[in-house]
Amino acid sequence: MSKKPDFEKSIAELETLVEHMESGEADLDESLKLFKRGIVLTRQCQQLLDQAQQTVEVLSNPDDPDSAEAFEPDE
């Protein structure tokens, strides 16, 4: 069973990765692994933000305020 990514946890992990990379303590191999993980986390966060934006747009349709409905993203 796959757990959906959590935005706040992903951001916190990303911040930790950046701090570690900026410290200069990681060698090249570790830095590349951290960078790759950072890319994955960044993409997950962007996807979650995109879904949130779509939800807000669906819920706040100014042309038809009575059309508010929950947005279910494609999985």
Image: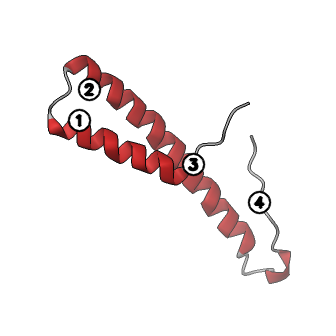
Q: Which residue matches tag 2?
A: 31
**Quick one: SS at disc 2?**
helix
Q: Which residue matches tag 1?
A: 21
Total labels drawn: 4
Sequence-wise, the earlier of marks 1 and 2 is 1
Mark 1–mark 2 CB contact (< 8 Å)? yes
Write the residue at 38% across / 43% down: 14
**Quick one: SS at disc 1?**
helix
Mark 2–mark 4 CB contact (< 8 Å)? no
Sequence-wise, the earlier of marks 1 and 3 is 3
Sequence-wise, the earlier of marks 2 and 4 is 2
Q: Which residue matches tag 3?
A: 6
Residue at the outermost left position: 24
Query: Disc 4 or disc 3, which is closer to the eye?
Result: 3
- Say left or right for 74 vs 33: right
Residue 63 position, x and y percent, is 76, 80
Sequence-wise, the earlier of marks 4 and 3 is 3
Sequence-wise, the earlier of marks 4 and 1 is 1
Q: How crowded is mark 2: few (under 14 residues within 10 Å), some or many (20 or more)?
A: some
Mark 1–mark 3 CB contact (< 8 Å)? no
Query: Disc 4 or disc 1, which is closer to the eye?
Result: 1
Quadrant of the rendering where the C terminus is positioned? top right
Q: Which residue matches tag 4?
A: 71
